[in-house]
Image (cartoon, helix red, strand yellow):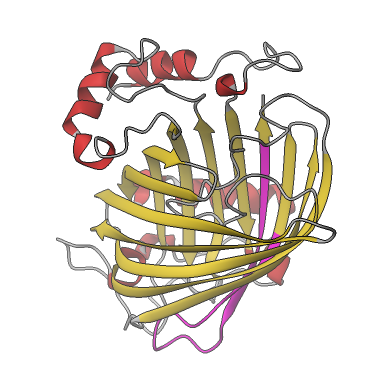
Amino acid sequence: MTMKHLLILFVVLFPTVGLGAEGDDERFCSTINLYLENDLFGETDQHYTNGIRFSCVSQDLSSYLKDPDLPDWVREANHRLRFFHSLKDAETLQRNLVISAGQLIFTPGEKDISTLIEDDRPYAGYLYLGFAYHIRDREQLDTLELNVGMVGPASLAENAQDLIHDIRDIDKFQGWDHQLENELGLQLVYEHKRRYKLAKQWPNQDAIVHAGGSLGNVATYLNFGAEYRIGWQLPEDFGTAALRPGGDNSAPGRGDRRRCRLPICGLHAFISFDTRLVARDIFLDGNTFEDSHRVDRRPVVGDAAVGFSFLLSGWKVSYAKVFRTREFEEQRNTHQYGSLSITYSW
């Protein structure tokens, strides 16, 4: 898929912001998401130290194979992936395509050491593009996502971190000469989510459970988790995930006032967890085909988060504090970071 193809697909699937008017057919609602994560919020500067992701969720599609708004080459690609969506042809389902781009940055704990730190995680970065299918109804969401990118110097992680440190006027990390080598990264992700409404009266409450997995040289794992939300005017979506594959949960579903361009104001708190049974993590295990620095990866890693979300008209703004268990045996302490997401639907 060339950059020209991506631009054409973006124009077709994501109409100009502001074209919709109040009361328009909610099928033509598109969503953009921006995720920003940094351990600055945890008052550290190490391990998973920065992440950014931008994604676009298309308006509803009548079919992945026959929708006239899709370019021929997209319909052909969808035909090759019909094993995922051909069994889910009910007219009541909501179908969307998602395009994303992101970058992850990982460092050891000691920024002033320029030599290899053998008992700490490798310097690493990942710059990627993603393409995903969403199939959903009011209670369930299935996501199939393919991410393709580069690990190593080509990820521009060192450049990005140096720029951030220049802006913040803080010392730079000195050991980037020891980062992982360049490697093409491939990751195929599937995740299923189910939402249970617990209380429609004030305070509104629901629970969202998820399970899935990832296959590829970047990460191979099985995962499961849940989120509990309580507040006022809970959105018709699937929660607020931290920046991770398969985590674009905030696009509004049918019945959500954001899809109809109707006024809405809401506020809720949430707690969540995600547990991963990890078979491979390139950022800890090192390069797949090259001899590189690596550490002893732990087989089970868990994240817990607590946060809040605010809704106003087409906007949803969320912030969470994420707490992560130790990822490798040499790691002395657990890790924590802040996760900010901004979603706009029109």
Percent across and percent down for residue 87 are 25, 39
Residue 333 magenta? yes
Front residue of 283 and 152: 283
**Viewport quadrant of the C terminus:** top right
Q: Residue at x 62, y 23 (%)?
A: 26
Compared to residue 196, the image places residue 236 above or below, namely above
The magenta-colored residue range is 320-343
Give the total of numbered labels: 0
Rendered image quadrant of residue 306: bottom right
Residue 339 magenta: yes
Asked if residue 164 is positioned above or below residue 253 in the image, the reply reads below
Residue nearer the viewer, 311 or 113? 311
| Residue at point 40%, 45% (across, down) | 127
In front of the other: 345 or 118 = 345
Horizontal arrangement in the rendering, residue 334 relative to residue 280 (left or right): right
User: Which percent across, then down, holds residue 154?
Assistant: 35, 44
Report which quarter residue 130 is drawn in.
top left
At 68% from the left and 42% from the top, the residue drawn is 342
Residue 108 falls left or right of residue 80 = right
Residue 50 image point, x, y percent: 56, 57
Give above or below for 287 relative to 336. above
Q: Quadrant of the N terminus?
A: top left
Q: Which residue is painted at 56% across and 87% down in the image?
A: 333
The answer to whether 152 appears left or right of 231 in the picture is left
